[in-house]
Image (cartoon, rainbow, N blue to C red):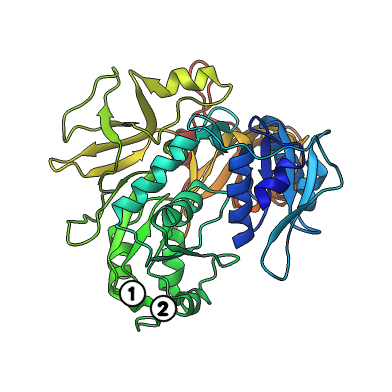
Amino acid sequence: MAAHALAQLGLGRRDTIALVLPNSAETIVLFLAAARVGMAAPLNPAYKEDEFRFYLDDIQARALIVPPGGAEAARKAVPAGAALAEARVDEGGKVTVECARRGSRREAAQPGDDDVALILHTSGTTSRPKQVPLRQRNLHFSALNIARTYGLTATDAAMCVMPLFHIHGLMASTMATFASGGTVIVPPKFDALTFWQVVATRRATWYSAVPTMHQMLLMRNRGERPRGAERLRFIRSSSSALSPETMRQLESSFGAPVLEAYGMTEASHQMTSNPPPPADRRAGTVGLATGIQVGIMDDAGRLAARGDRGEVVIQGQSVIDAYANNPEANTESFTGGWFRTGDQGFLDGDGYLSIVGRLKEMINRGGEKIAPREIDDVLLQHPAVAEAVAFGTPHPRWGEEVAAAVVLRSEASEKDLVAFARERLADYKVPRKLFIVERIPRTATGKIQRRAVAATLNPT
């Protein structure tokens, strides 16, 4: 039993167990085991050594689990004193954990509702990524909530194409399916070329993905309904805005209703969703509140009337109590018992939520939320860079792509700076456009105006 193996490393309820693993059945097993024994912290395998070092130090990881012979950058960044273990699968499908170091042997205790089960990070616009501790009760409620929303049953099979270090893949595709007694299908990665073959062979009944993945499937479609699509009860879209046109094309090409949802890490994923047929699903909206309360708040902290625009706020059993070790973020994010999402939107007369735009300046690249400040900090490490500001630029496939503007103190080329960033950042964070400018706009108090930079440099 994987949980027993982790406990035998001397790990317990207050210990953070980092997982750097590819999508696989064994990754799900180890996530569940880590969440039972201690606090699971799945990390993106694409991170570079410096990124791993930040995250592993921030969560005070007591153990790092990696695949045999893999995750070299993570291995180099493992904190002193932390256990380094390899996850293996034997011929019978049993997951084992091998580690040269042994701790004080113990048994895996049953976690309580208030125990932290999962630690993820979410990006802010003016700070390093914030640590989000999700408790057992948060995840339990969220899994049941998502299963109820879509009427999932033991006969359903979910195609999990979202990464398992992301709340979307963990909760919507995986935990909600388990809560209903259904089956999770886990290919190693999303591949538009083989997607429908797996759907047909494994008899999937639904899948959830970001708009970028949906668009890739549409690009590969040759006009005929793919084999396997006839079994789909619905297609779910979340983590980034889905255009009404893409929704129309998906339904026309694949013959299944498309249900757009709205989620975030701090809410253990789903907050709203368009309901499945025969209920009304509305293109351009992210649907109705599902299991939690959703409101709109004005600048004065008052709840607004239906139809009025303001900041989307939420409260409910899946919402975090607070960020970890970040009183400033907690003060900014909670008002009168409501969590402020940082997104601007409005509720129509029937309660359907529309998201107008993000108040936060995060870059949303195909559902991956990227903190511009993180990219600023890397570029500023280059000796030739005096000032740097990252921002999002429109992209037809990803929704947004990373761009940056820099002011130089000495000679350097765009190619040099991008190569420098590529050595220190995961690929999806590396600027695809880099502008060398004479100055960067600032407010009267000296703060960088990202929107002014973006408006000036982004093509119209």
The residue lying furthest to the right in this view is: 100
Asked whether residue 144 is in view, the answer is: yes
Circle 2 packing at 10 Å, graded few (<14), some (14-19), many (20+), is some
In this rendering, the label closer to the viewer, 2 or 1: 1
User: Picture coordinates of residue 313 (x, y %)?
Assistant: 32, 30
Relative to the observer, which residue lies in front, 89 or 164?
89
Q: Which residue is mark 1?
A: 254
* Quadrant assignment, res 107: top right
**Which residue lies at the image location 83% right of the left edge and 41% below the top edge?**
102
- Residue type at the position of mark 1: Phe
User: Picture coordinates of residue 311 (x, y %)?
Assistant: 31, 30
Spatial CA span between label 2 and label 1: 9 Å
- Residue type at the position of mark 2: Asn
Asked whether residue 429 is in view, the answer is: no
User: Picture coordinates of residue 447 (x, y %)?
Assistant: 53, 22
**Residue 36 shows which numbered tag?**
none
* Quadrant assignment, res 234: bottom left
Does residue 377 appear to the left or right of 195 in the view shown?
Answer: right
**Residue 221 shows which numbered tag?**
2
Does residue 122 appear to the left or right of 358 in the view shown?
Answer: right
